[in-house]
Image (tube, grey):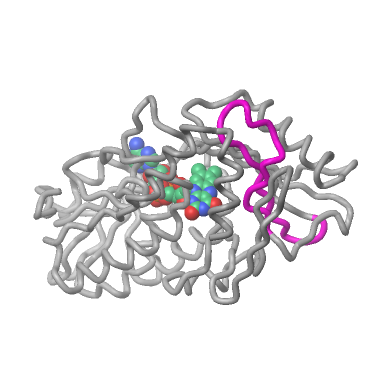
Amino acid sequence: MSGSFIMPLLGCPMSSDPVQPRNLIPIAVIGDGCAGLSLAAKADLLPGYALAIVAPRLERPQQDHIWGMWQMDWLKDTVPLARKIWYKWSIRSAETEVVMQAGKHPYLALTRQTWLAHCKQRATLHGVAFHDEMAKLVDLPAQQVFDSRPPKQRPDMMLQHFIGWHVRAASGSFDDDTAILMDFRCDQSRGMHFIYCLPFSDSEALVESTLFSPSLEPDTFYETAISKWLTGCAGLTDFEVTQTETGAIPLGLMARHDPNLQGIGGNGGAIRPSSGYAFSFIQKQISSAVVQVISCGLRAPIRRLIFGWTGCFCRCYVISHSVRPRYSLKWQRG
Ligand SMILES: Cc1cc2nc3c(=O)[nH]c(=O)nc-3n(C[C@H](O)[C@H](O)[C@H](O)COP(=O)(O)OP(=O)(O)OC[C@H]3O[C@@H](n4cnc5c(N)ncnc54)[C@H](O)[C@@H]3O)c2cc1C
């Protein structure tokens, strides 16, 4: 990474722009997803800077989905917004089940819309400007551009891909004390495959079929796995699907969307290669970026997060799919 990220984007503000106090240093942020808005929400911590978000209006609004994560010290803002918190979670295979418990670091679920709305509200309160045309970027006199557009994905990359169903069933259908993070009682023929079940109450749950492999399967693969698990493992005969979510998260190192711009979020290396988890790491990255700007100004590059051994872990999964369920169970046992 280069030592300086001051961008050559000095230009003349357009006459319709809000008048910016002369002494504020302008910063532009591309993208209004998790990383872009999480940074904008912290604008009050950067009183010497004027932040502007540049994000084109999407033809189709991004689907809502759940972010799951372990509660950490740097996630204090997310806890009051959580849809549900679990102090127990389990990993299971046909042979065995491991149940883990945590007092200090429970597992929590947050909806994307809740978090983005919270960040946008804070950002607006702290005077962040929002622009919905990329062309605006050249007009902004930004001395730094943080870019959260997706990084460049290689065609052969390992992916974590999934379809999730939000399911409603009769009360008593789910044990809402325990999140099921991996249940391997499903088809293992296409790659490492497990069912992820977050029970929000005893009658509502997100049930996801998640596969680790370099290529996507037809939707029927994931849907059949969810249906079979709901009937065969959860013992449900009648349920309603109220919402669906899908995703394909690339796992591994990727080049930034634009090598000349400072990447943040997925574009700044914040996706953990072994699991696809990113929300927590994005919050950590944004907090450290803010501290760096406060203490060193705009010259300091934002460091990539180091996930060294988790990348090896990911490759081990790929090498021998027959040991994957056992490996995951052992790993959870410690
Ligand atoms: C369905 C799904 C479920 C996930 N679940 C979890 C989970 O449970 N736990 C977890 O930790 N992580 C999860 N992740 C991974 C990760 O947390 C998210 O992908 C997260 O949103 C990444 O944040 P980001 O800001 O890097 O990207 P995004 O939130 O995707 O934001 C990217 C922004 O860039 C904009 N953009 C894209 N292309 C362009 C362009 N060409 N020009 C201008 N702007 C552009 C988009 O509009 C958006 O505003 C999940 C991801 C998905 C997709």
Is residue 290 on the magenta stretch?
A: no
What range is drawn magenta here?
179-203
Q: Residue at x 53, y 60 (%)?
A: 334
Res 153 → quadrant: top left
Q: In this view, does 213 lie to the left or right of 176?
A: left
x, y (%) of residue 36?
36, 55
Q: Residue at x 67, y 66 (%)?
A: 88
Q: Which is nearer the eye, 171 or 194?
A: 194
Q: Where is residue 267 in the image (x, y as percent from the top left)?
A: 32, 45
Residue 170: percent from the left, percent from the top?
89, 53
Q: Where is residue 310 in the image (x, y as percent from the top left)?
A: 40, 49
Q: Is residue 55 above or below residue 291?
A: above
Q: Is residue 275 above or below residue 19?
A: above
Question: Per the image, is 199 magenta?
Answer: yes
Residue at x 34% of width, y 43% of height: 149
Asked which quadrant contains residue 99, the reply is bottom right
| 187 in relation to 251, above or below | above
Q: Is residue 329 above or below residue 25?
A: above
On screen, residue 317 versus residue 25, left or right, reads: right
Q: Can residue 136 be seen in this view?
A: yes
Q: On the rendered structure, is 272 left or right of 109?
A: left
